[in-house]
Image: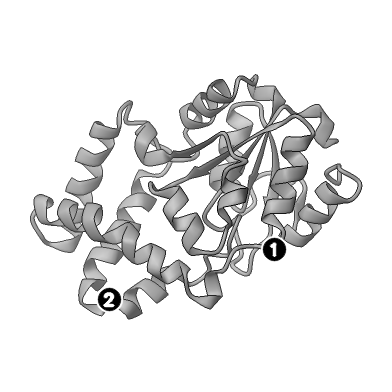
Amino acid sequence: MKLGAFKAVIFDFDGTLYDNTGIAKAMILKNPFRFFFLKAERDARRRLKGRDFESPENFKKEFYAMASESARCRTEAFARWYERRYLKRMAKALATKPFRARPQIYDVFKAITQSGKKIALYSDYNDIEMRALACGISQEALDLCQGFYSSETFGCLKPAPRGFLQIAAYLGARPKDCLVVGDRDDTDGFGARLCQMQFVQIKTKKSKDVLDNAHPVMSWEDFAAQILGENKILD
């Protein structure tokens, strides 16, 4: 499966461009008084995984209602904390050593764009550029991307196909001409397959369920070596 066969590459952000193993624990240790809010946020996302709410407003309504019930607080209080505090605290955690960006991201992005292909980043969370800079991805690398997209702004959570399909449309590529690079087969990989996109799974410290063994699974270092060396992805 050669990179030349693709016109666009969609990179998952969290877990793929940096190893997010332990990020929840790090955030709790930095803000232990919000343990129940932090836990409620993660639990709500797991329960809502794969659902398409058709709009960001519909997603927020159900997400905030479910999370606030779990956290035993008013919906308005949870929404205010999430929108004003949560991602800023995540960015602070990403600035610490365990969560630094993968090596050679700029070189990989440059090689892809120089071959005439477009790049997009797709995260579960908003403020992708802020968080990417926090973990050490350079502005020069981010400038090579054609867009930053989140499940929150689409109003659907991976592996719902609409987000992947909309990104492909924004990049001007047919789904079958897109490569998805992510660390989770149950979200990134499953979503890619639903859209008939190809998928490469990046191995991390934290084990992930693999639903389909047909795709390549490799470390970020091996992926980068393939892009920068032979310019192909291993079969």
Asked if residue 205 lies left or right of residue 151, the reply is right
User: Is residue 175 positioned above or below 188 on the image?
Assistant: above
Confirm whether residue 214 shows in the render: no
Q: Distance from label 2 to label 1 (Cα)?
A: 29 Å
- Residue drawn 64% across the image and 51% down it: 210
User: Is residue 29 positioned above or below 167 on the image?
Assistant: below
Measured from the top left, where is residue 153 in percent x and y?
Answer: 36, 36
Q: Image quadrant of residue 50?
A: top left
Asked if residue 137 lies left or right of residue 56, the reply is right
Q: Which residue is mark 2?
A: 31
Quadrant showing the N terminus: top right
Secondary structure category for the residue under label 1:
loop
Confirm whether residue 118 shows in the render: yes
- Residue drawn 56% across the image and 58% down it: 15
Compare residues 213 and 9 and report the one nearer the observer.
Answer: 9
Residue density around tag 1, few if under 14, some if 14–19, many if 20 or more, within 10 Å: some
- Residue drawn 38% across the image and 46% down it: 126
Looking at the picture, which amino acid does disc 1 mark?
Answer: Pro
Q: Which residue is mark 1?
A: 103
Residue density around tag 2, few if under 14, some if 14–19, many if 20 or more, within 10 Å: few
Give the number of the mark in front: 2 or 1. Answer: 1
Asked if residue 52 lies left or right of residue 109, the reply is left
Secondary structure category for the residue under label 2:
loop
Compare residues 31 and 103 and report the one nearer the observer.
Answer: 103
Tell me whether circle 2 and circle 1 mark residues in contact (CB < 8 Å): no
Asked if residue 88 lies left or right of residue 83, the reply is right
